[in-house]
Amino acid sequence: MLFYIYIVAITAEAMSGALAAGRRNMDMFGVALIAFLTALGGGTMRDIILGNYPISWTQHPSYVYLTISAGLLTMLVARYMQRLNRMFLVLDAMGLIAFTIIGCNVALSLEPKYHYSTLVVVMAGMMTGVGGGIFRDILCNRTPQVLRHELYASVSLLVALLYLGLKYIGIDENINMSVSFVVGLSIRLAAIYWNWSLPVFSYSPNKWQ
């Protein structure tokens, strides 16, 4: 199940990256690059930091073709995407949850070799979940979504903790993935619908003078 969600997720993330590039009036190369980094950048960063070689997409070039094609396709259908905005929010949420669980799994698979602590496993999951979006936003000269008030990275954190907690108490892997996915997706969609957010720190030097 997670594999199919992963395919949907990298496609959706690639298209969201292409839309962000379009808002900055980038050419075809820029669109393709942003689409690729948004979809696969988080996993690439995770693999480099964890020492997980070869990096996953280098062994599966079909992922590269898929993300670049999705980005370029977006250039053709962008005019219709305003109507599909809600669908893309759902797909992006699915990508966040799926990438987080996948990132945790990759770190756990390396644990016997490198003895990664739980903290590192959680960070690997979050890095996979939000890393591509950080690349996209920085290259498009926007404040990264994970640093804004909207619940995003915190959802990734909760999913990673839930997944590892259920794994620790011996819940079946398929049930664990399903529960973690549904809970994470529900929280993310609820945060979008009701505008849930973390407290915002607003500092203005003039205010205290």
Image (cartoon, rainbow, N blue to C red):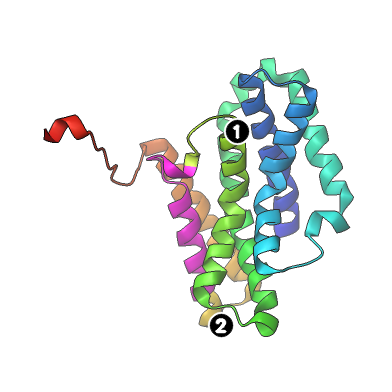
Q: Is residue 201 visible?
A: yes
Q: Looking at the image, is mark 1 or mark 2 earlier in the sequence?
A: 1
Estimate the x, y position of residue 103 in percent, counting from the top left: 63, 62
Residue 87 badge: 1
Please tell me whether the stretch drawn in magenta is mainly helix, strand or loop: helix
Q: Is residue 178 above or below residue 32?
A: below
Which residue is painted at 66% across and 21% down in the image? 22
> What segment carries the magenta color?
146-165
Amino acid, disc 2 = Gly
Residue 34 appears left or right of 70:
left
Estimate the x, y position of residue 9 in percent, counting from the top left: 68, 46
Q: Is residue 138 above or below residue 108?
A: above
**Residue placed farthest to the front in the image?**
209
- Viewer-side residue, 150 vs 196: 150
Which residue is painted at 66% across and 40% down in the image? 13
- Viewer-side residue, 17 vs 190: 17
Whether residue 153 is in magenta: the answer is: yes
